[in-house]
């Protein structure tokens, strides 16, 4: 299934436009003015990537996908946000933390509908806020505030959903349209054209089984039970299933209510590369953008993707499609014991090595080991000296030999420096 993402043809407005935080989270102040299509968030562990996604989910749904964010004691904390709605003007509000009531303030009236909101958590959990099923004009005790799935519930189901294992079998047995869509989504999210994720034939695995188990057909021809699939495949399978399930249920609810499906989807993904092989990491973001277009079909629904990542391959993979008019890159840094959130300029860096040394990852050298990086830094410092001694050159040379590969590109630079000093007689005895 060919996927093509042409950002130059993108039309529409941002869904989640901005988040401004005061005295909540890892920094006294943080601000994100988001792009309308793709937003990537990078930063070291513990600096606030998942926190920003949790807040984004809350401002759009007024529910917490995980634990409620609580500010520092005694601080006057605010979450200001803005998002588009059906009418031309945007919805904006400044929520204040009410410590005596242990809650964040909201407008008494119902907020405008921001669209269909999806959140894939890094642990395999998944959250859905559907305006057709979670937002009603009339009050009802039967209406869930959102659909929240633990990792186990994604597979085994809960009161809202049968889960991957049961729905897969039902959809496949009935030749359901949903199974056709699921198959298309799986194919689009596959690691490569030669390693497609395809449904296999259901079968019983042991004599203790209560019935058949769904399988996937591996590139080597064997049908493997979903429960035996790799972590990477299981994450993609769960993601494909929940995207299919959420959009189908949204469409069906819209028909029952006599309304059109949402024209906007905000899709939050934490550690989008989780469990994926490097080859897969290079494809996942463009594939997800294409998948959302495939799911929504003729409705012309636009998707805003907000994804946190640790992967230089993910950042490099969007070089052909990144457009600063519609996409953005945000980076969290720790400087002088203070967390800073910046909107970085994105440009094509070419080789993956250049992304490793970019502000996203801050490596001094694009080397796999800390020892290699330290040795190269010492060699570069020695090269800046006017007349290093032969003993110093020999010591650094031996250190480089101990940690660098024989084909490392740094050898060209180092040997040129080392041999040139001896030829010119500038090395001290």
Image: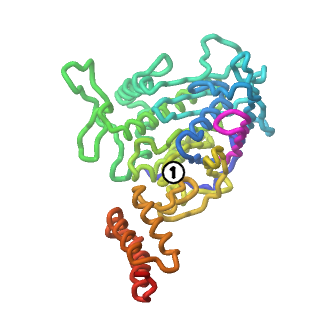
Q: Residue furthest left?
A: 207
**With respect to residue 218, does 62 lie above or below?**
above
Question: Quick one: quadrant of the C terminus?
Answer: bottom left
Q: Which residues are magenta?
A: 19-36
| Figure quadrant of residue 210 | top left
Look at the image and say whether residue 403 sits in the magenta stretch: no
| Figure quadrant of residue 349 | bottom right
| Residue pictured at 46% horizontal, 61% vertical | 366
| Figure quadrant of residue 155 | top left
**How many residues crowd mark 1 within 10 Å: few (<14), some (14–19), many (20+)?**
many
**Is 202 or 60 nearer to us in this picture?**
60
Describe residue 404's horizontal placement relative to residue 283 as left or right. Answer: left
| Residue pictured at 76% horizontal, 27% vertical | 96
Describe residue 309's horizontal placement relative to residue 406 as left or right. Answer: right
| Residue pictured at 59% horizontal, 23% vertical | 146
Describe residue 14's horizontal placement relative to residue 425 as left or right. Answer: right
Q: Which residue is mark 1?
A: 286
| Residue pictured at 20% horizontal, 24% vertical | 206
**Is 385 or 242 nearer to us in this picture?**
385
């Amino acid at each position: 299934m060919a996927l093509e993402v042409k950002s130059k043809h993108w039309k529409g407005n941002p869904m989640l436009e901005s988040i401004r935080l005061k005295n909540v989270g890892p920094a006294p102040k943080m601000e994100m003015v988001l792009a309308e299509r793709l937003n990537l968030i990078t930063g070291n562990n513990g600096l606030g990537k998942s926190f920003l996604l949790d807040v984004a989910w809350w401002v759009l749904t007024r529910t917490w996908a995980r634990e409620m964010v609580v500010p520092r004691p005694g601080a006057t904390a605010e979450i200001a946000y803005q998002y588009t709605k059906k009418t031309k003007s945007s919805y904006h509000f400044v929520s204040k933390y009410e410590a005596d009531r242990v809650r964040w303030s909201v407008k008494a009236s119902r907020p405008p509908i921001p669209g269909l909101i999806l959140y894939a958590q890094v642990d395999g959990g998944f959250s859905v806020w559907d305006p057709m099923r979670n937002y009603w004009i009339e009050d009802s005790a039967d209406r869930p505030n959102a659909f929240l799935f633990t990792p186990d519930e994604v597979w085994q189901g809960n009161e809202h959903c049968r889960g991957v294992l049961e729905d897969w079998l039902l959809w496949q047995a009935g030749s359901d349209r949903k199974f056709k869509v699921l198959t298309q989504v799986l194919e689009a999210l596959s690691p490569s054209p030669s390693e497609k994720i395809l449904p296999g034939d259901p079968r019983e695995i042991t004599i203790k089984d209560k019935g058949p188990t769904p399988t996937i057909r591996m590139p080597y021809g064997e049908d493997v039970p979903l429960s035996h699939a790799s972590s990477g495949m299981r994450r993609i399978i769960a993601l494909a299933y929940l995207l299919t399930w959420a959009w189908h249920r949204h469409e069906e609810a819209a028909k029952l209510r006599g309304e059109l499906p949402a024209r906007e989807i905000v899709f939050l993904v934490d550690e989008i590369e989780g469990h994926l092989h490097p080859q897969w990491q290079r494809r996942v973001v463009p594939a997800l953008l294409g998948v959302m277009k495939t799911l929504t079909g003729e409705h012309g629904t636009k998707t805003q993707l907000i994804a946190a990542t640790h992967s230089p391959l993910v950042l490099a993979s969007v070089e052909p499609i990144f457009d600063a008019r519609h996409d953005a890159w945000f980076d969290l840094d720790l400087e002088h014991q203070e967390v800073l959130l910046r909107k970085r300029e994105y440009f094509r860096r070419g080789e993956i090595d250049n992304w490793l040394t970019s502000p996203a990852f801050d490596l001094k050298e694009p080397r796999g080991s800390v020892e290699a990086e330290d040795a190269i830094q010492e060699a570069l410092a020695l090269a800046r000296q006017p007349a290093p001694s032969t003993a110093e050159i020999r010591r650094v040379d031996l250190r480089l030999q101990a940690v660098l590969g024989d084909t490392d590109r740094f050898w060209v630079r180092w040997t040129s420096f080392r041999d040139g000093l001896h030829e010119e007689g500038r090395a001290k005895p």
